[in-house]
Amino acid sequence: MVGTDDGHTLAGWAGCALAAAGAATAGAGIIGWRPGLWLGAAALAGAALLAWGLHLAGWGKPPGPRPAAQRPVRVRDMSARDGHPGCVGCRIAGRGRRAAASG
């Protein structure tokens, strides 16, 4: 969908970079470098945790479009502390339950 700005955040880019490195390492493990399978799997799990942690720290964004002033990668989302409505990552962390219950 054009204009949604999905994933253009520090959390998105960092998580994607680590996941790509993990996939490459796991691929090396598949073709013969046995430690690569385990290191790649660990890097993939680390990528998910890194992206989630950065999202919760305000370097991610809520789902859906955001205003043009909030689109640059270096802009921190100050509403992350309260949790984003409809965000699974925020709900897993226990944020935004009051907003979800009242809405």
Image (spheres, rainbow, N blue to C red):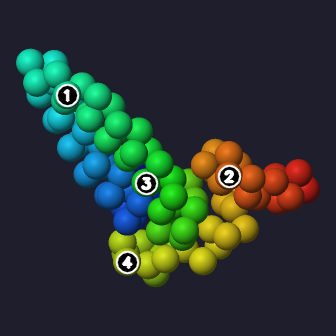
The secondary element bearing badge 4 is classed as loop
N-term-proximal mark, 4 vs 1: 1
- Quadrant the C terminus occupies: bottom right
User: Residue flagged by tag 2: what amino acid is it?
Assistant: Ala
- Where in the figure is residue 34, as x and y percent of width and height? 17, 22
Q: Along the line of sight, which residue is nearer the eye, 86 or 32?
A: 32
- Which SS class for mark 3? helix
Question: Which kind of residue does numbered mark 4 sit on?
Answer: Arg
Q: Which mark is residue 35?
A: 1
Give the x, y percent position of residue 47.
38, 46
Q: CA distance from mark 4 to mark 1?
A: 36 Å
| Amino acid at dot 1 | Pro
The residue located at (69%, 62%) in the rendering is 83
Q: Residue at x 86, y 58 (%)?
A: 98
Find disc 4 in the rendering and name its residue.
74
Residue linked to disc 2: 93
Q: Residue furthest front?
A: 35
Q: Which percent across, then down, holds residue 19?
A: 30, 43
Q: What element does badge 1 sit on?
A: helix
Of labels 3 and 2, earlier in sequence is 3
